[in-house]
Amino acid sequence: MSHSILLTGASGYLGGSLLAQLSHAKLPPYNHLYALARSESQAASIRQYNAEPLILDLSNQEEVIKTIIDAKITIIYFLVDAMKSELQIPLIKALGEVRKQIGGDQDVHFLHTTGAKIFSEHAGMPIDRRILDTDSNLYELQKSAKAPHSIMAQAINTNNTIIETAQSHGVRSYLFIPCIVYGEGSGFGNRISIQTTAVIKAAKKLRAVYNVNPEGALYIYAVYVDLLRSILSGENPESGRNGYYLASSGSVAWSDIYTAIARALAKRGVVDNEVVKEADDVILAEMGEALGCPKEFVAVQLGGTCTLRPDRASRIGWKPQYSPEHILDAADAEVELVLKHLKA
Ligand SMILES: NC(=O)c1ccc[n+]([C@@H]2O[C@H](COP(=O)([O-])OP(=O)(O)OC[C@H]3O[C@@H](n4cnc5c(N)ncnc54)[C@H](OP(=O)(O)O)[C@@H]3O)[C@@H](O)[C@H]2O)c1
C-alpha cells in the first residue's frame, strides 16, 4: 500500500515552508498529502498547494484517532509543539492502529520536530565535548539530563516520550533537530522565525542589543524532504533511539549574530548604536518583559550552546546548502523582514 502523509503546523513558519516545498518536490509516488487545518480559511490556503486539508482538533483524542485511521495515514510530520507531548501521543497511537489494520510489512512513521536548544546546556545536556547526532548514547544522555529550567525539562521529556511511545506502538519515530532557522518563510501563514525575532523584539524595546551568553554556537538547516524521500523509497532510514537528525551546516558564535543584528538595527535607528552590551540582571528582567517570559528564560530564548554535530542526515543524502556564516550575511534582510512583521 502506498503511503498517505499528514503535515501538521501548515500555517506556521516551518510547516508552511515545508508544505510549499513538498508541493513541488520530486518524490517517489504516494497516495495522499493531507495538511492539518484549524479553520476554513487555512483549508482554502492548503488547497492551493495541491494538498488536502484535514480539519481536526488535535486535543480531541477520539477524533484524532478515528480521522487518522479512516484516512489511512501512515506518515505524520509534527511541527506544532516541541515543548509538550500531549498532542503527539494520540497521533502516534493512531499510527500504531493504522499499522495493525493494514497488516503486512507496511511501516508507519512519526516525524517529530524538536530543537537544538533541547540539546543545549539550557536542557542540561553536556557542552564540554562534541556529540554526534549518531552517538549511540544520545537517548541515554537526554534521559539522564537535568535541565535547569522546568520548561526545558518538559521539552527534553517530550523527546524521550516520542521515542518511547512510538516504540511501544510499533511506530518508527524520527526527531528533527532544526537549529536557528531564518529568512522569510514560504508558507501561507507565519513568515518569520522564532529566535531572530526574539533578539530583535528585545532590542527594539531596550534600544540596544544585549548578549545573554558567556559564549555560544548554533546550527542551521532542514532535512525534512530528504527523510520523506528515503521513507517513500523504502530505504528504512534509522529511527527510534537512533532517529536523531540534526539539521545543521556548522556553528556560528551568538556574539557574531548579535553584532550583525545590532548593525542592521542601528542603521534603521531602532537601537541607539551598534554596540552589543552585556546583559545584567536588571536588563534581563526588562528583556523578559519585552519577550513575555521570566528573566531566567531570556538566555534560553536568545542563546545557548549546543555541541551536537550532524552526521546522520548525510546518510539520507542531505547536504547543507549554505555555510554557517550565511546567517551573518543575511542578518540585514532578516532584520528588515522581522521589523516589517513586528509592526503589523
Ligand atoms: N522556527 C524555528 O527556528 C524553530 C527551530 C526549532 C524548532 N522549532 C519548533 O518547531 C515548531 C514549529 O515552529 P514554527 O516556527 O513553525 O512555529 P509557528 O510559526 O508558531 O507555527 C506553529 C504551528 O502550529 C500550529 N498549532 C499551534 N497550536 C496548535 C494546536 N493546538 N493544534 C494544532 N495546531 C497548532 C499553528 O497553527 P495556527 O496558525 O492555527 O495557530 C501553526 O501552524 C515549534 O514547536 C518550534 O518550537 C522551531
Image: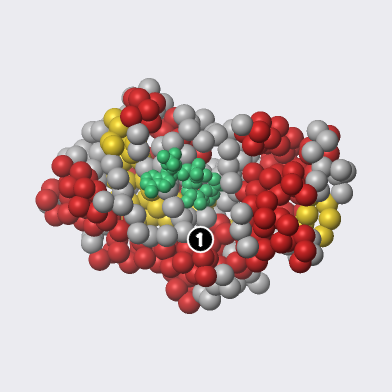
Please say whether residue 237 is visible from this viewpoint: no
Point out the image quarter for the N terminus: top left
Residue 106 spot, x, y in % from top left: 19, 49
* Residue positioned most to the top: 48
Count the marks: how many? 1
Q: Nearer the viewer, residue 15 or 220?
A: 15
Q: Nearer the viewer, residue 35 or 125?
A: 35
* Residue at image point 74% right, 47% down: 205
- In the rendered image, which residue does mark 1 sit on? 133
Q: Is residue 320 left or right of residue 258?
A: left
Q: Name the image colouring.
A: secondary structure
Q: Is residue 10 visible?
A: yes
Residue 241: x %, y % from top left: 38, 65
For residue 283, what is the image quadrant? bottom right
The residue sitting at 83% across, 39% down in the picture is 266
Relative to 20, is 273 on the left or the right? right
Relative height, residue 199 to residue 26 (above, below): below
Q: Position of residue 59 (x, y in %)?
A: 31, 52
Dot 1, how many residues are within 10 Å of its Cα: few (below 14), some (14-19), or many (20+)? Answer: many
Please state which amino acid type lies under the numbered disc 1.
Asp
Q: Which residue lies at the image location 68% right of the left edge and 45% below the top edge?
A: 201
Is residue 338 shown left or right of residue 119?
right
Residue at 37% in and 42% down: 8
Which element type, helix, strand or loop, lies under badge 1?
A: loop
Asked if residue 253 is positioned above or below residue 10 in the image, the reply reads: below
State which quarter of the image contains the C terminus: top right
